[in-house]
Amino acid sequence: MTAPRVLMLPGIQGSGPGHWQSLWEAQHPQYRRVQQRDWDRPRRAEWVAALDAAVRADASPAVLVAHSLGCVTVAHWAAAGPGLVRGALLVAPPDVEHDWAPPIVRDFAPIPLAPLPFPSVVVASTDDPNAEIDRARGWARAWGSRFVSLDAAGHINTDAGFGAWPEGLALLAELVTRP
């Protein structure tokens, strides 16, 4: 069996050069970023359509690696009837429904709560400024995802001190190698 494609789905601003997603792409040139038309002004329909096009661009299965708003994009895409996906690593999903969520992400509300039709892992932090840990745990439960809680890891990004994040790469390896 061949290894699945790995598709990266950053959040707003597209994960800069020091972000773990970008570092993983540099380390593994076969990983592909799902490009968005506008990283600074996300629109749910556009982001979901870009993910759909990336998955359908190749008949081989894919594993999705999403950060922040990319996680909510995956949930919306899966609810619409996904293509061939072997699994998803969903890191730091934001609470786009909360009163304090910035208006720019409100287009992604409500967050779908249907079980994902593929194995998934949700990774969240106890002090993420974009989502309370109990909300993230609830999404993981609704999506049928394994839940991994990180203590005081912020938004699990460059600003929170995350570089190459080898623990995350190990979680991805579990999804890539599963049958």
Image (cartoon, rainbow, N blue to C red):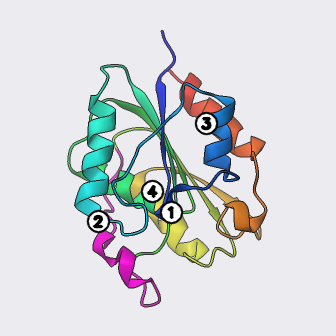
Mark 2 in CB contact with mark 1 (< 8 angstroms): no
**Quick one: label 1 or label 4, which is nearer the N terminus?**
1
Q: Which residue is mark 1?
A: 13
- Please tell me which residue lies in front, 95 or 163: 163
Instruction: Please provide the residue range marked out in magenta.
Output: 97-116
Residue 49 x %, y % = 24, 48
Q: Which residue is mark 4?
A: 71
Q: Secondary structure at mark 3?
A: helix
Q: For the residue marked with disc 3, what is the amino acid?
A: Glu
Give the number of marks: 4
Task: Measure the C-alpha gap from mark 2 to mark 3.
Answer: 24 Å
Q: Residue at x 75, y 57 (%)?
A: 162
Give the residue type that dot 4 points to.
Cys
Q: Which residue is mark 2?
A: 43
Q: Earlier in the sequence, mark 2 or mark 3?
A: 3
Disc 4 versus disc 3: nearer the observer: 3
- Mark 2 vs mark 1, CA separation in Å: 13 Å
Q: Which of the two marks, 2 or 1, is nearer to us in this view?
A: 1
Q: Position of residue 12 (x, y in %)?
A: 47, 64
Circle 3 residue = 25
